[in-house]
Image: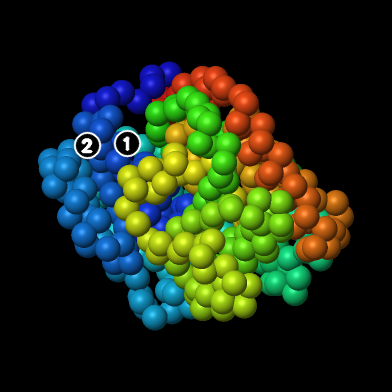
Amino acid sequence: MILFENDSVVLISSYEIDELHGSEPSTGFNLTELSALKFKKTILVTSNLTKQIVLDSLKERFKEKIEIHVVRVQSLYWSSHPIGFYPVYRRWQKDFGKFLNKNKVEFDLGIHASLGTFLFGSGFSLYDKPYVFGPAGFSFFRMSYARAYGWKSLIEVSRNLVVFALLIGDPFVRLSLLRAHTVIAGDRMVTKILQKIYPESNLLEKTIPHYHGSPYKYEASDSDKLKLDLIWTGRFISRKDPLFALEVFCEILTHSPDAKLTMIGDGKLRKKIEKFLQKNNLKKSVTITGWVEKSEVLSMMKQANLMLFTSFRETAGVQLFECNSVGTRVIALNATGAASWYRNQLIEFVPVSFLESRTSLIRKYSLRSIKMRNEALFQDIPLKNREVEINLLEEILSSICKS
């Protein structure tokens, strides 16, 4: 068995890549960047949903070391529709497979890092080359959060059922899982389910380190003790629940009236958030920045005392690793897949009891947030490089060999 070497050609399939927006697009971006740095050549196949400026930037940086191909989606309108997205994405995967066959693309290893990894199959399965199915994946909504999450739980439960149906009965999904050299899942619940449905597949229970950064040693100063600077980052969408973060912040203000919250991101809940700020007189305490450059995000994370991570369903959560990489503590709901395998002194996962009320969970989350912040004032946190400085591509390649 021979490990893939630096003179290998790696092909990355990513439906959309974006350095700033979304866990899976940023995973695709990080993989592409790391591959171009490490290997002789990287071939990126993406869709026209990826902004041209992103592709131009990669081409300018890596020149002949990267080759980029765009396989167009059938409908840009339906690609952003909550329901219409699925058949469009599935069609794109098959078009990607046809692209490989038509052009007889030569590469040593394929990495499937597209949206909805396990849900709708991979075009790699239509081509006779070794590929990794993952690392971007999916997570199941945990029923213990049903009451706290409200009526939206019905949507999530329906999604769980659709996922089961696809995994069990969809020929394209089955082919994609069974033909993969390695299947990588980041959520252990997902891993267990896949092992039961596909005992014959080469399933690798592997953590998914999304971010490659440098460790930073937290050092409290006297001025830090006088303030509580919180940060929240992500898309303003339902399952990431930025409104939950604001409800928690209101509770925190009763204990720390001088606390400040910075929200980095944007999305369809922006108007609801602004109405909440107006109604609760939070305009002076909460700042919404919109989307900012990644370097600035990391800088703002580093300056904050604590990050609020409030997703009610998350495969892993890029922000957890980014925030930890600069030494900032994180308080998160244990709904994220990372809660089952990621351990770091800088992060606290808040558990939920079965059908716990939203009010109860807000109170629990806010009290733990304050407790974490107070502990941070008096502790030096020693960080091991490998806790936060993990190269995802290295992790994948260390477990994938060829004859």
- Residue 72 appears left or right of 329: left
Which residue is painted at 44% across and 39% down in the image?
A: 302
Residue 14, horizontal then vertical, whole percent:
38, 54
Q: Nearer the viewer, residue 35 or 367?
A: 367
Which residue is painted at 76% across and 70% down in the image?
A: 150
Q: How is the image coloured?
A: rainbow
* Label 1 vs label 2, nearer the camera: 1
Can you tell which quarter of the image residue 311 is in? bottom right
What secondary structure is found at the residue carrying circle 1?
helix
Residue 376, horizontal then vertical, whole percent:
61, 32
Q: Which residue is mark 1?
A: 34
Which residue is painted at 67% across and 62% down in the image?
A: 250
In the displayed image of the protein, which residue is found farthest to the bottom? 77
Residue 190, horizontal then vertical, whole percent:
67, 47
Q: Label 1 amino acid?
A: Leu
Mark identifier at residue 171: none
Q: Would residue 76 be visible to someone looking at this image?
A: yes
Q: Label 2 amino acid?
A: Lys
Estimate the spatial distance between the alpha carbons at disc 1 and disc 2, rounded to whole Å. 11 Å
Q: Would residue 204 be visible to someone looking at this image?
A: no
Which residue is painted at 16% across and 43% down in the image?
A: 61
- Residue 111 appears left or right of 384: left
Mark identifier at residue 41: 2
